[in-house]
Amino acid sequence: MGFDIIIVNYRCYEALAACLSALERETEGLSRVFVVDNTGLSVPDDLAERFPEVNWLLNRRNLGFARAVNQGIAQTTAPYICLLNPDTVISGPLFGPMEEWLEDNPDVGIVGPKIQDGDGSVQGSARAFPSLATAFFGRTTLVSRLWPDNPITRQNILTDRSLHGPIDVDWVSGACMAIRRSAMEEIGPMDQRFFLYWEDCDWCTRFRSAGWRVVYHPGLGPVIHYGGQSSRDARWMTLYHFHRSAVLLYWKYDRTPARIGSLLAAVGAVLRCGLLGLRLVLR
């Protein structure tokens, strides 16, 4: 029983070491840990020696997040799988309580625990399927950063500290996401057309469409997510893939507002890249 853990790493070895150290302290519900490394290099010797129980899967080039996750899934055998970002740290018992809860709720295909930022604030890891409003009130938009408690942002992103019990949501973040194997075998693996970003939203949408519940459970965790560790030095590519995947997601689900959203995502990509270029020129 228990969980097989899949961590996709890309140039994030310092944070990965902290993540693996925290996993060593998990004494219940943890089966095996797989690190799929997309860096294109060999794993540092000190890291491999420090964590000899970790199963390392090395790619010669960056194959993207979804494809790397699917590589890891193919190696797993446990009844539950947990995706974990390399820049996360589990701060308390997680897998034992999460397994017990999933056993008691057999209609749940995916569950996400509480995720916190490095400063202890609740991260918006439980979200509504993106709509036209998401373009202006999404987690990383200027409006949400300046006015995080506005009612539209709160409808899109659950960060209410008063929420303690499980709640059904459209999707949860792949930074820490637990998946029931039997449900995954019915739905299929991640869509590898999503190179980076939005693959978690797509996967959750597919689970829900097949009748499986997707649940955010703030009573599980917390998991600390420091965020952006592997992408901070590749801002151009990060912006490109974020918006490319948003266009793919909107277009994949045949809804008129979603099709309009895909155009907004494309325009947003051009504007954000232009602003980034201007900032670099003015430095």
Image (spheres, grey):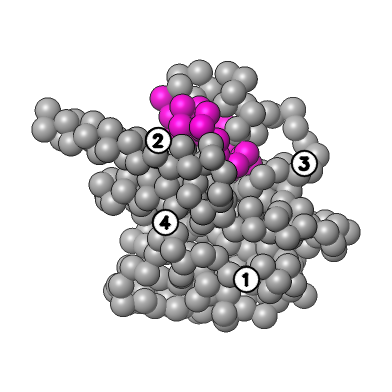
Task: Give the residue at mark 2.
Answer: 264
Q: Of label 4 and label 1, which has the lower sequence position?
A: 1
Quadrant where the N terminus is found in the figure: bottom right
Q: From mark 4 to mark 3, how far is it between C-alphas?
A: 27 Å
- Seen at 21% across and 34% down, the residue is 274
The earlier-in-sequence mark between 3 and 1 is: 3
Give left or right: position of 41 versus 5.
Answer: left
**Mark 2 vs mark 4, CA separation in Å:** 19 Å
Q: Which residue bears the numbered disc 1?
A: 188
* Callout 3 amino acid: Ile
Identify the disc placed on residue 196: 4
Residue 35 x/y as whole percent = 48, 71
SS assignment for the magenta stretch, majority = loop
- Give the CA separation, mark 4 to mark 1: 18 Å
Magenta stretch?
118-142
Mark closer to the observer (1, 2)? 2
Q: Is residue 186 above or below residue 141?
A: below
Question: Between marks 1 and 2, how big is the CA–CA gap?
Answer: 29 Å
Tell me where residue 131 appears, x and y as whole percent. 55, 35
Instruction: Note whether residue 116 is visible.
Output: no
Is residue 120 within the magenta segment? yes
